[in-house]
Amino acid sequence: MPDYDSANVFAKILRGELPAERIYEDDGSFAFMDIMPRSDGHCLVIPKVAARTLFDLPTEALGPFFGVVQKVGRAALAGMGADGLTLQQFNEPAGGQVVFHLHVHILPRWTGIALRPHTGQMADGALLKGHAAKIRAALGPA
């Protein structure tokens, strides 16, 4: 498998070189809004360590990382008033991975509403800020 590329977009976000609409952060994970959302409230959780895929994350980091996925997922469900969630995690190009830093997509879902196609179009920043505020509010005090 290829090595981790520290020039990937999520590594740049972690280093503060690119902006992101923050939802949650702790010592090991960072959650933020997806700028090309396939549903309202679509967000991402990434580990702060250099892990290309799920299989590169140290075993001892799996529990805390997925604890954050669960925490942010619950907040996205409640904050967005969704009927359910889709969680997606891709590994390597053949598995659908496009950004080569481990990440989990959290997609709030509503009955009868399909996911939007991935068009490559960026969402309006004000819309993302509003969705992030709803999810952060559902997380409660930091």
Image (tube, grey):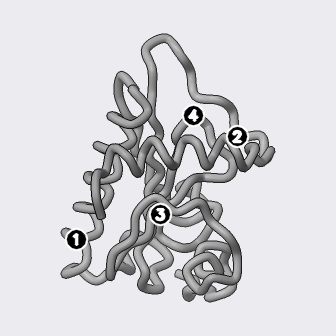
Q: Which residue bears the numbered disc 3?
A: 103
Where 141 falls versus 108 (above or below)? Answer: below
Q: CA distance from mark 4 to mark 1?
A: 26 Å
Q: Earlier in the sequence, mark 2 or mark 4?
A: 4
Residue 80: horizontal and vertical position, in percent? 44, 32
Quarter of the image with the C terminus is bottom left
Secondary element at tag 1: helix
Residue shown at the point (63%, 42%) measured from the top left: 37
Where 32 falls versus 79 (above or below)? Answer: below
Q: CA distance from mark 3 to mark 2?
A: 17 Å
Q: Quick one: label 1, few (<14), some, or many (20+) residues within 10 Å?
A: some
Give residue 87's quadrant in the image: top left
Q: Which residue bears the numbered disc 4?
A: 39
Secondary element at tag 3: loop
Disc 3 and disc 2 in contact, CB within 8 angstroms: no
Q: CA distance from mark 3 to mark 4?
A: 17 Å
Q: Which residue bears the numbered disc 1?
A: 64
